[in-house]
Structures are given as structure tokens and as C-alpha cells.
Image: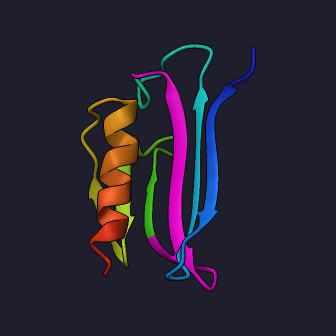
Amino acid sequence: MKAVLIYRKTEIRPDGIQLEMVIWQLPAPTSDRPHGLKYRLWAGRNGKTLVRYDNESGKGDHKHVGRTEKPYVWQGMSALVENFLNDVEALK
């Protein structure tokens, strides 16, 4: 069984920041994705990453703000999107 896309949104904001958010439901939870979701939430301008939240295999939940990578504490899918958008807003 494959991962199922459950959320996808792309947007170019008036300030020129591009957003790409995708979340998949995995067939089963894994040790590094115990919530059973795989995700990539990205914000950038001119191809340069400004903020990214992801949970690539082997790394678990984490976020990138500029060149800094920090762990991200999972609080649910709605909180994931909200926290990401808050970090994007903080760029202003």
C-alpha cells in the first residue's frame, strides 16, 4: 500500500513568498514517523528556502528556518500547518 496524499496547497503571496505544503498518510506509523504522516511544508522566494518543515526518513520531525535546523515537536496536523504559517509570518 502506498502513501495517500491528504493535503496539498500551493500559493504565491503578494510579498513574493511561495508556499508549497504537502502531507501524506502513510500505510502505517514508523519509528521516525509515529503519527503516520509524511510531510513537506516549504516557503521560499526566488527558489531559496526561507522556512521548511519536514520529516524525511531517518530524521523525524524538524524544521529549517534560514540555515538553522531545529527539532519540531509534533502537536497534530492542524498545529503543524499553523506553526509553519506563523514562522512564515515572522519573516516580515
Rendered view: 44 above or below 10: below
Percent position of residue 56, x then y:
52, 46
Residue 30 on image: x %, y %: 48, 22
**Going by the image, does 43 lie left or right of 25?**
left
* In the foreground, 35 or 57: 35
- Quarter of the C terminus within the rendering: bottom left
Magenta residues (range)? 35-50
At horizontal 48% and vertical 17% (from top left) the residue drawn is 29
Quadrant of residue 87 within the rendered picture: bottom left
**Residue 77 sits in which quadrant?**
top left
Residue 91 appearing in the image:
yes
The quadrant the N terminus occupies is: top right
* Residue 32 found in image quarter: top left
Residue found 63% across the figure and 80% down from its top: 47
Location of residue 62 in the rendering, given as x and y in whole percent from the top left corner: 35, 51
- Colour setup of the view: rainbow
Does residue 67 sit above or below 5 in this rendering? below
Q: Can residue 61 be seen in the rendering of this structure?
A: no
Q: Residue at x 61, y 62 (%)?
A: 11
Main secondary-structure element of the magenta-colored stretch? strand
Relative to 43, does residue 15 appear above or below in the rendering?
below
Q: Nearer the viewer, residue 87 or 63?
A: 87
Answer left or right for 91 relative to 57: left
Q: How many marks?
A: 0
Residue projecting furthest to the bottom? 46
In reply to whether residue 38 is colored magenta, the answer given is: yes
Extreme-right residue of the structure: 1
Instruction: Find residue 60 and report its horizontal and vertical position in percent.
Output: 40, 41
